[in-house]
Amino acid sequence: MTQLPLRAQLASALGRSAATLSRMTGRGDGSVIGGRVGLLLEPDLLRKLAHDRRLALVSATNGKTTTTRLITSALLELGEVATNAFGANMPAGHVSALAQHKTAPYGVLEVDEKYLPEVLDTTGAGVVCLMNLSRDQMDRAAEIWLLAQKWRRALSGKPTHVIANCDDPLVTWGASTAAKVTWVAGGQRWKEDSWCCPECGGPLDRKDAFWACRECTFHRPEPQWALDDEMAVDPRGQRWLLDIQLPGLANRSNAVMALAVAEAFGVPVERALPHLREVTSVAGRYTTVERDGRHARLLLAKNPAGWLEAFDVADPQLPIILSVNAQGPDGRDTSWLWDVDYRILRGRPVFVTGERRLDLALRLDVADVPFTLCNTFTEALAMQSPGRVDVIANYTAFQQIRSEFGRAV
């Protein structure tokens, strides 16, 4: 790799020092503050750190962190990989990730949907993985059709190889201006944000996995990769049993996307798949923590589509604790709770906590889902009998719970 200019070397070193100090003092994992310090000293640091590296950017509303982890695991077959493993997915986090692994020839960066155009332009990444778009943090992020439009503009005219989920019409529209696209049939369980054609506004007709606009030519492309229940189907028609340890349909979709990206880097399925099977949890997601004989499995859900996937993973035979906050990273507006169909929880013990527990309690009451209101997560967990319990929490609530258990990963 080309040596960094002296100013960039100094900025990178000071950023790493700030990150280390942050971790040592217990203020955080350092993945944001290190990048901020580096960018303050050298505003063009991300571009300089990305130079001469083969990079993949991963963006979506849901599944970014997990898919980033899966791709990273696969690419370790090639050598050292720089990645923002803890989900700091804006430029400061990208600077920290690349600075921490300054000699890594490869990088896999999770990117916030809104920042994808800027990060792609700055880094010149050769591969971009796009998985899904749905409503999320509407008080902070743009309307998702606008995000898809920004993706289209960012990809137009660039040599980037895009790996995109063709089952999501908005992702398909956003990716379709790219010079090269590998289409993956990754599935789309949440369809409430894609009943209209993003090209002309007409209605989308759906039959099984296929979709097409009734009023223009926009339609689902033919996929090269596909998820078929437990199997990944590659572009040559060969079927591979995924057999990954991460639970649920969404994670099998994430795995197929990861395999497609790995192949774009030259790692064939037979070499990539064993690495994907080694991943058991991602930044605390799916981890089981224990206290006084109670084994709580932690699931993250930040928006309606995410809750739908969390319900798929949750065990219907177990009690469940739900925790919702509305801090800055979550979005202050909790009206999205009304887009989640909580009726699936009827018939099981439900415990509600979090800073916005009353918002969630009202939503459950309207859905005729009986629940127990708890002031804290500790109180909710203490009310369980010894044994297993599922926990679904949104972002900051999830991090607070992790902190109670020493940020188990």
Image (cartoon, rainbow, N blue to C red):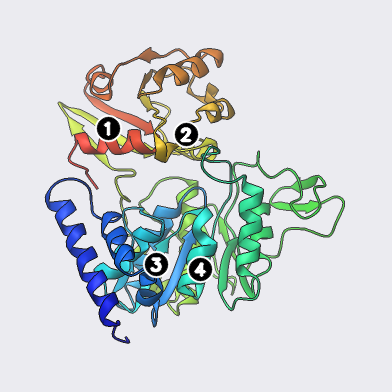
> Residue 176: which quarter of the image?
bottom right
| Mark 1 or mark 4, earlier in chain | 4
- The amino acid beneath tag 2 is Phe
| Residue contact between numbered discs 4 and 3, judged by CB atoms under 8 Å | no
Task: Decide which of 108, 100 is in the foreground and name it.
Answer: 100
Secondary structure beneath dot 2 equals helix
Which residue is identified by label 3? 108
Relative to 69, residue 298 above or below: above
> Residue 355: which quarter of the image?
top left
Position of residue 185 measured from the top left corner of the image (x, y, whole percent): 61, 59
Task: Decide which of 339, 33 is in the foreground and name it.
Answer: 33
Secondary structure beneath dot 4 equals helix
| Mark 2 or mark 4, earlier in chain | 4
Query: Image point 24% across, 18% down: which residue?
Result: 379
Query: Image point 40% across, 54% down: which residue?
Result: 66
The circle drawn on residue 409 is none
Which residue is identified by label 4? 120
- Mark 2 or 4: in front is 4
Mark 1 residue crowding within 10 angstroms, few (<14) / some (14–19) / many (20+):
many
Query: Image point 65% across, 76% down: which residue?
Result: 157
Position of residue 136 measured from the top left corner of the image (x, y, whole percent): 53, 41
Mark 4 residue crowding within 10 angstroms, few (<14) / some (14–19) / many (20+):
many
Q: Residue furthest left?
A: 24
C-alpha separation, residue under disc 2 versus residue under disc 3: 29 Å
C-alpha separation, residue under disc 4 versus residue under disc 3: 12 Å
Q: Residue furthest right?
A: 215
Which residue is identified by label 2? 311
Query: Image point 47% across, 34% down: which residue?
Result: 311
Position of residue 77 measured from the top left corner of the image (x, y, whole percent): 33, 75
The circle drawn on residue 296 is 1
C-alpha separation, residue under disc 2 versus residue under disc 1: 15 Å
